[in-house]
Image: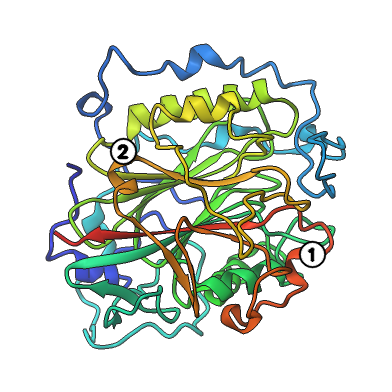
Amino acid sequence: MAMKLPPYLRPLLAMGFLALACGEGEEPTAPPDSGTTVDAGTRTDAGTTVDAGSDAGQTTDDAGTTEDAGSDVDSGTNDAGTEVDAGTSVDAGTTEDAGTTVDAGTTVDAGTTTDAGTTEDAGTTTDAGTTTDGGSADAGPIGETDTDGGYTQIRLMAANLSSGNGQDYDPGHGIRLMQGVKPDVVMIQEFNYKSDSASDMRSMVDMIGAGFYYYRETGAQIPNGIISRYPIIESGEWKDAKVSNRDFAWARIDIPGPRDLWAISVHLLTTSSSNRNAEATQLVGYIKANIPEGDYLAIGGDFNTDSRSEACLTTFKQVVDIAGPHPADKNGKEGTNAGRSKPYDHVIVDSDLRQYQVPTVVGTSTFNNGLVLDSRVYTPISDIYPALNSDSGASSMQHMGVIKTFRTPNF
């Protein structure tokens, strides 16, 4: 079981006085001792499966190109050579003294909540999880924690929902879709908004959940990231050796209960299934080396998979449960690309967390296996306000959101 913060420090973290690894580009704290969680005989050597130099001359993913539902061909408009070398990934060996962030001289009113309208630096964390919902069936209004009889209901979402020509969320379609389903943790791709300044990113996150925590990888053209209702206590990025304009973004999240949740946001290549499998093999190696087996694990995002039998999903099976049944829309359809014919997007979790999956309840509707969010077919649309019927069909909206819900014990 992973070491969690002592109880007397968690209120300080919840009120924003322990600002740990929750903003853009911040050095994460030390990951757990991989030797205590990995069987040396089974650990995957990520370095032996991927030739980091093999992608130097190839064209990488064009996330902004409108995808033909019947094919997975990359249009090649993304120039991977113009991006920052992924060597900016966080050195997991860096340690952080959580006790150094609290100003003992600061006068604190323990009853004061954070003003979501305050402009914050991207590295600052804000506590939004102190208000408790009485245990409603759905995730509750934004800003509340849904607890019920010693359990916490957590809604996970994979979201590559950028639109327009800028591979960002400025047009607003994707933001409305996330607002409509009220996720607790979002594994987001193409995490750009307006100028990408600290204030702009804070503004976007607050629209999804006022005061939510987030991590956004640095030095990437189309960065991955994590947005969370609960405190992010560690975060960083692991190198994706197959692509130069993004990496694997991860966050260790302090959910209620003795176990932490590790959320990993991924955006695999469109170029070939073999490249996607190489990326999956590398990520499995990182997971085995860094994530305690006693904690929960969720991998979410845009896998660009043509089918559920692709090799990368079989590779991920080493650390997560990929078995069905799978999320679907209001009509029972599972595809998540624009044409709804291919399973591009996923939320997959380890067996420890999978046992706690419950139906996803949105408004008056229940989705037993989770929801593929396509506003074009969603009825009644008022249940996912402020989303519009047209949002999922917006220009360059190539993916549908995927949501799963879990009811985890607080003990």
Q: Is residue 281 left or right of residue 111?
A: right
For the residues bearing labels 1 and 2, Cβ distance under 8 angstroms: no
Figure quadrant of residue 100: bottom left
Identify whether 126 is placed above or below 58: below
Q: In percent of the image, x 71 and y 21: which residue is there? A: 55
Badge 2 amino acid = Pro
Indicate the position of residue 341 as horizontal and vertical percent values.
73, 45
Classify residue 211 by image quadrant: bottom left
Which element type, helix, strand or loop, lies under badge 1?
Answer: helix
Residue 360, percent from left and from top: 44, 65
Crowdedness near tag 1: few (<14), some (14–19) or many (≥20) residues, C-alpha within 10 Å: some
Q: Height in image: 363 above or below 329? A: below
What amino acid is labelled 1 in the image? Gly
Residue under the image location 29 percent in, 61 percent down: 101
Q: How many marks?
A: 2
Measured along the vertical axis of the image, is residue 263 above or below residue 150?
above
Residue extending furthest toward the front: 331
The kind of secondary structure element at disc 2 is loop
> Can you tell which mark lies on residue 393?
1
Q: Which mark is residue 117?
A: none
**For this rendering, which residue is in front, 237 or 371?**
371
Measure the C-alpha gap from mark 1 to mark 2.
40 Å
Can I make out residue 219 in this image? no
Q: For mark 2, what is the residue?
A: 31
